[in-house]
Amino acid sequence: MLVNDAANKVLVECLSTGADFAEIFFEDTTNGSIALISGKVDQVSTEHVYGAGIRILKDVQEVYGYTSDCSLDGLLKLASKLKKAYNEKPLDISFELKEENAKENAVSITRPGSKVALDERVLLLKEVDKGLNSNSKIVQRFVKITNHTQYVTIANTKGKFIHDLRNQERISAQAVASDGIKSQMNSDSIGGNFSVDSFKNYDLVDFGKKVATTAVTMLDAPEMVGGVYTVIIHNGFGGVLFHEACGHSLEATSVAKGLSVFSGKMGEKIASSIVTAIDDGTMYNEWGSTNVDDEGNETKRNILIKDGILTGYLIDDRNSRLMKMPSNGAGRRESYRFSPTSRMSNTYIDNGTSTFEEIIKNTKYGLFCKSMGGGSVNPVTGEFNFAVSEGYMVEDGQITHPVRGATLIGNGANALLNIDMVGNNRTFGHGVCGSKSGSVFANVGEPTIRIQNMTVGGNGGKN
């Protein structure tokens, strides 16, 4: 545990060669996982992560280093090494560290995952496995529960000395269906930054059944025929398209350098007028929420797009200096081994006014993407490529038959402008997002949306 007196001495050392800001990020983290394969415990692992990172800034210049030696001598040694990046007289900077625990506005943990018995976790997995085993065509079943219990302390020369607890819990399920000739896989997950007891709010057997049913449904689906379609993207993890194709381009990491398609477009129309997009790190016990970000700032509800107009970016402390705009609780990092930068938390397109039924009924011909898979995006251009893991054709206002192998291809900026219907059924999906400051927990979400004139790749023959 980092104590006040030691933190103060290290920060003073950091400032002794002319820097104007210094920060210590300390963490004590336990990562655990248990996996069931076909109903039997197959994997159990535990990892302990312990260390501290030190960051020193002068204007926008940054130097960063980390160590697993968190003794006072170890931290002073690292600070002494890092401060050599600067060679000027110390500035007249005084500070007083005010120790506090983060206010539990966004996350409250009653039982950290590191305190939960293995047997209790196995029982949860077996409930999911019952659902996966509900269809005779399922030939492989895999269920995994992971927990990430992270205690952090952040101290800096703004006077912050704050402690916070995070506890991400996640259950992932995967099923493989086969008819003896071909096979089809499907997966899904549920979780949050909450205590393991919150899984009691889910019907775990039903969750497993849905994963298995989708795998079986897609087993006999014909291949998608490529072309330009009206595309309906369902709620929840469908929000991964906005997250990847647009969200990263709204982070100061790329905006501040002019490397984003949205750089310099504040106040301009960048989306359909029925689109409002938000990043909200304060949503209670959600997967991407924290009480404070990894710079010690309270997380916020940041409106990025309002009625189609660009109204905000995600900004961390260092990039706020470059952009001449205030930071807004978006500084995140994977661990003490990474310097923080601007990152998404719970990012979503907000509810609109249409019902799911209205969106389907008003579609003459198109593709309904019920579940999205992985993809890739160029944050500079916004060009993306996403797989559809569960898709159906829509014909004359009705969902008809499943299709597989569909791929969405396009440009994030164009896709935003071509959204012409937004549902009122927003939900979330859980992911891990990789970027400059490592991999962080991120929620993606949206209601059902409809996009016109989207290119869809597929391996099927002609219509």
Image: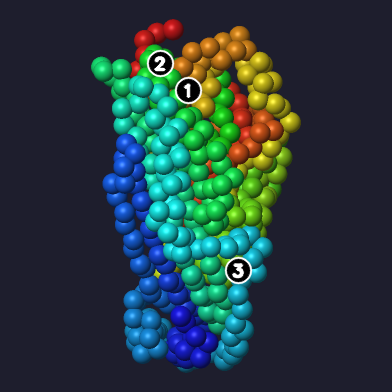
SS under mark 2: loop
Query: Secondary structure beneath disc 3?
Result: loop
Q: Quadrant of residue 330?
A: bottom right
Going by the numbered disc 3, the residue's amino acid type is Asn
Q: Which residue is mark 1?
A: 391
| Residue at x 34% of width, y 47% of height | 35
Looking at the rendered image, the quarter that the C terminus falls into is top left
Q: Give yes or no for contact between labels 3 and 2 (Cβ–Cβ under 8 Å).
A: no
Q: Nearer the viewer, mark 3 or mark 2?
A: 2
Along the line of sight, which residue is nearer the eye, 420 or 27?
27
Q: Residue 238 in the image: x percent, y percent?
A: 53, 35
Are the two marked residues, 1 and 2, in contact with CB atoms closer than 8 angstroms?
yes
User: Which residue is disc 3 drawn over?
Assistant: 297
Q: Judging from the image, what secondary structure is the residue with disc 1 in?
A: strand
Q: Residue at x 60, y 88 (%)?
A: 96
Give residue 221's mark: 2
Find residue 55 and report its horizontal and vertical position in percent: 44, 76
Q: Earlier in the sequence, mark 1 or mark 3?
A: 3
Q: CA distance from mark 1 to mark 2?
A: 9 Å
Nearer to us: label 1 or label 3: 1
Find residue 380 and report its horizontal and vertical position in percent: 46, 46
Residue 149 in sight from this viewpoint:
no
Up/down of 391 relative to 382, above or below: above
**Label 1 environment density (alpha carbons within 10 Å; few <14, some 14–19, many ≥20):** many
Residue 308 figure quarter: top right
Badge 1 or badge 2: first in the primary sequence? 2
Measuring 31% from the left and 42% from the top, which residue is drawn there? Answer: 40
The amino acid at mark 1 is Gly
Depth check, front residue: 221 or 317 = 221
Mark 2 Cα shell of 10 Å, populated few (<14), some (14-19), many (≥20): some
